[in-house]
Amino acid sequence: MTVDSDNDLESQIAEWRTYVHRRQELHHTDAEELEDHLRSRITELTDAGLRADEAFLIAVKRMGSLDELSREFAREHSERLWKQLVLPGEPDVRTAARSRRELAVMVLCAAVAALAIKVPALFGIDISDDDPGFYMRNASLFALPALAAYFAWQRRVSLRVIGVLALLFIVGAVAANAYPLAADSQSIVLTAIHLPIALWLVVGVAYVGGDWRSDRRRMDFIRFTGEWLIYFVLIGLGGVVLVLFTMGTFDAIGLDAEEFINSWLLPCGAMAAVIVSAWLVEAKQSVIENMAPVLTRVFTPLFAVTLLVFLAAIIWTNNGIDVERDALILFDLLLVIVLGLLLYAISARDPAAPPGLFDRVQLALVVSALIIDVMVLLAITGRIAQWGFTPNKTAALGENVILLTNLAWSAWLFLGFLRGRMPFTRLEHWQTRYMIVYAVWAWTVVLVFPLVFNFA
Amino acid sequence: MHIAKDLVAASSTPLVLGILDEGESYGYAILKQVNELSGGQLEWTDGLLYPLLHRLERLGHVESAWEAPPGGRRRKYYRITDQGRAELAEQRRQWAAVVDALRGVWSATQSIRPITALAWGAGR
């Protein structure tokens, strides 16, 4: 054999190997075993006097068709059709070492987050205290810095970005604690709601590795957020079971575990779950189908029908919407849900696909939500002046306007897309660019509102 | 002569276990030995040996280990377990019973009829 035919053979075997690797039923070690077999067969045939390329063809033929092989492997290893999450067969030693290192850093970050929430207790601020103000204001400041640190490490972000991240977290911490907010004030509730949103978007900067101007990376962060929420809720459900069993079993031996659960298990567990969920989303990214778009598919038609029936009911009964004080918040939440359904449908959509029935349902959902919200706004504006501009009212109204603007323009872009006048990516860009509005608004509520409303 | 697929499948487990009973081996060598033992009559699709080996491993009849000669490619070796030996003995008893029964049938008919019967049987 000449050097040339040797190289030729190697490239042929490499090509065959890539075909084998594409089969999900065949793991890396199986491919290696089969390759060893292939090579043995080729060696035997070339020793018998065949040329390398002839030997290769015969050996591949004798191996049997890949379809048949995959089928047999799938029958033997049916578990492989269920994608496994935590310990996937790592293709090579280096990625295996890397995922082990990631696991270690994740555990470290989760431990830091879990312990961070116990630090204030060292200074006499207990969770079980009657005054929950401190933990309400600071809830997001225990886990989210650790989460940002995890992403900063994993994405190897530049020092400049790390500086920006640290600065933003410090600003958040100062805003939450420097203002003299009373525990029963509206401002403290607003801070407790908006600081996590503001800081979550800061985590987003770490998530995208500092490349926060990129539309694609922002969309990745939106996808991440949806999946993270789902995993967090799932872990939370597991946590509820754990708490119930802890209480029940210790109760059975006459010990009261409530104190331990309230001041250790729940807070530390919740903080660690923030990190673990994020790690799970990252680890399973390419292993398991995203859940948020699936839920979106299921609930978009249901919500669309509900809203259309609601509109029909208003017209039919001629009942006006009862604009109680909480109505604005309820309809804010409705817009958030509609926006979420829109976002996660966009996040999973192939931009090149032509408009379909689902897109029309989506547009119907958005438009009906818009009509309902406009009706609510018209009914409520008169009353707002009467109630006066409290922080709560202002925040609720501001959010409503922000969401309304987003959805109205989305509906317009959507219509253009359905009529074939605009590419779908316009809608995607609109959503990813709009994230900056959320960030500005959340920070405004946290930083400016208490000053404007005199810490009310 | 072409041996029917069902027969190949049925005989594959005792063949592999029997070969491994002689000592540890790897896929390609097992296949070569099957070929030699049957005088080239038993033809397996090469790749399909591996799902079989994996099944035997899952059932606990064989165990496997990767071994790498210095400077060479690593190779997966299979070794029979005690449970595998018990299974081999059991299969051997069953096959002996089948062979005995068949021998009885062959000596009773003793003509060309078995061949037509087989052809009829294959066309089910």
Image (cartoon, rainbow, N blue to C red):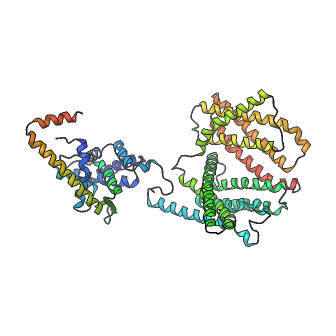
Left or right? Give the position of A381 relative to A91.
right
Residue at 40% over, 54% down: A28
Can residue A421 be seen here?
A: yes
Apparent side of residue B27 relative to residue A23 in the rendered image (left or right): left
Q: Locate residue A201, reporting x and y percent.
A: 69, 53
Between A15 and A343, the one lying in front of the other is A343
Q: Quadrant of residue A277?
A: bottom right
Q: Residue at x 83, y 49 (%)?
A: A392
Toward the viewer: A144 or A122?
A122
Residue at the far right in the pictured view = A386
Q: Could you say where residue A447 lies in the image, as x and y percent from the top left?
A: 81, 56
Q: Is residue B76 visible?
A: no
- In which quarter of the view is residue A145 placed? bottom right
Is A333 in front, or is A2? Answer: A333
Residue for point 53% across, 52% down: A284
Image height of B43 relative to A418, above or below: below
On the image, the x and y values in percent for residue B80 come to 28, 61
x and y percentages locating residue A147 in the rendered image? 64, 59
Number of marks: 0
Which image quarter holds the C terminus of chain A?
bottom right
Identity of the residue drawn at 9% across and 43% down: B107
Q: Is residue A220 above or below residue A367?
A: below
| A300 w.r.t. A11: above or below | above
